[in-house]
Amino acid sequence: MRYCWVVLITILLSGCNMITDHRIEYTYVPPKESKDSQFYSVVLRLTDRLLARMPKVRDDQTLAISSIVNLDKFGSTDGFGRQLSESMFAAFDARGVRLVEPRVTGRLVTVPESGEFALSRNAKTLAKKINITYMLVGSYQPSHSGLNVNVRIIRLSDRVVVSAVYEFFPADVTPVVPSVRSVNGGFVRNDIQPQ
């Protein structure tokens, strides 16, 4: 009996040494909301600089904003370019500039189980005549620490650049979804390196 107690206590105590300590060090990633507000602050600064360099926009003049494109691929953009263009709509509107939405089709298309749509990128479905005074165009170039962005406002009647501005968007404020890779059945962000 004494032998059974010794064996039982030895087994129980040896189990205490089998407790494992799972400690993983993760890099702190700030909340998305703070990055979004920092991004929009840079957009507002960019907008104010553009407006300061051009003639005052009259009430009868309009501005259209094109997609901001990758400098190496003028025919396409990505999430950053589209988000920058959309944010600039809000920023110019907040500054009282009259905007034109060139993607409006002039009709509402209803797609069952998807929603109602009035915007398009199909040239055949867009409104035929749009009165646009100025056009904002721009490009961006990725770098190791962020994105270099160049934007211009062009007067369409004579294609004169009335304002041009460069702005740097640090990588930590750009609203780009990080790429991920699969590791051992889980996902790991490519921008976080093991320490």
Image: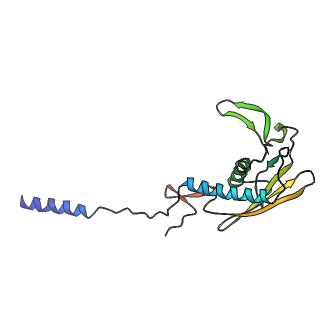
Q: Is residue 174 above or below residue 193?
A: above
Looking at the rendered structure, the number of numbered marks drawn on it comes to 0
Foreground residue among 76 and 162: 162
Q: Write the residue at 83% across / 45% down.
A: 59
Location of residue 111 by image quarter: top right
Q: Give the farthest residue toward the bottom.
A: 195
Whole-percent x, y for residue 57 in the image: 82, 50
Whole-percent x, y for residue 177 in the image: 61, 55
Q: Write the residue at 50% across / 67% down.
A: 194
Quadrant of the image containing the N terminus = bottom left
Q: Give the farthest residue toward the left.
A: 1
Indicate left or right for 73 with 129 as reference. Answer: left
Q: Give the farthest residue toward the right.
A: 158
Whole-percent x, y for residue 116 in the image: 69, 33
Foreground residue among 150 and 144: 150
Whole-percent x, y for residue 160 in the image: 90, 57
Location of residue 152 by image quarter: bottom right
Foreground residue among 74 and 139: 139
Q: Is residue 103 above or below residue 165?
A: above
Location of residue 37 by image quarter: bottom right
Indicate left or right for 114 with 181 as reference. Answer: right
Indicate left or right for 168 with 190 as reference. Answer: right
